[in-house]
Image (spheres, grey):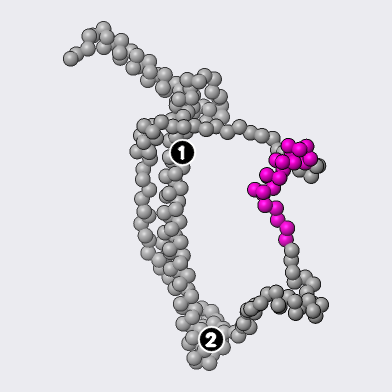
Amino acid sequence: MRMNPVNEQNYKEEVNKMSDFEVIHRSRLDEILAGNAEFEDASELEDALIALDKAKNEIEHFKNLKKRRAAFYDSAIKESDEKHESIRTAVQEYMKKSNNKTLKFPGVGTASVRTLKGKWEIEDEDKLLEHIESLDMSEGIVKMERKLDKKQLNKVLEELDTNNNLGDAVKRGEGSSSLTVKFDEALSSRIEAEVPAPTAPVKKSVSTDVSDVEI
């Protein structure tokens, strides 16, 4: 059913006004983001809340993307570490088998094997400390570190503050306010659809030739 020409014209004018209104608000938001303006009317906040929700979804998108890429490079680093350790072990085993302490390769480098002392393995720390103290050799060995439990400390300070007994070693910093925004589910669903899902990065080949490493 076709709309009455007069009503249709009025409808188009209202739509145009709304479009102009939205453009003005988006432009206003851009100025605020650039630090050149401030909100002056509550009606301007609607676009701000939409932009706020979109930014929140973008943050989650980039966090997920970062995790995926980090996982890929962690895997590549682990693979290279294992290769590095395997080659070192093979070289060391050969030198041990062939009784070579040093092998020189002009223009490349030198491989050397040296004997390392084993690390001390403490079987009973208390008994060991008691023995060392009996010999008056414990100075500088034991370190006592005092560390505040901030969660429990906050409870104590709140109680001291209530009783006006804080003392002069602590003071409360300047308070602040926090904005809480609850978004409509329909808005969040629509904006989530606009943010692309993270895709797995294409695995690149790893080459042992430095001049041929792909990044």
Nearer to the camera, 198 or 84: 198
Q: Is residue 70 left or right of residue 202?
A: right
Which quadrant holds the N terminus? Answer: top left
Q: Secondary structure at mark 1?
A: helix
Q: Is residue 102 magenta?
A: no
Residue lying furthest left in this view?
Answer: 1
Task: Give coordinates of residue 136: x percent, y percent.
Answer: 81, 77
Asked if residue 194 can be seen in this view, the reply is no
Q: Which residues are magenta?
A: 145-166
Task: Give coordinates of residue 70: x percent, y percent.
Answer: 45, 56
Q: Neighbour class for label 2 at 10 Å: few (<14), some, many (≥20)?
A: few
In this view, 185 is above or below 68: above
Circle 2 is placed at which residue position? Answer: 103
Residue type (three-letter) at the residue carrying disc 2: Leu
Q: CA distance from mark 1 to mark 2?
A: 59 Å
Taking the spot 74% from the left edge, 66% from the top edge, the residue there is 143
Q: Is residue 161 magenta?
A: yes
In this view, 214 is above or below 183: below
Taking the spot 35% from the left edge, 16% from the top edge, the residue there is 16
Circle 1 is placed at which residue position? Answer: 56
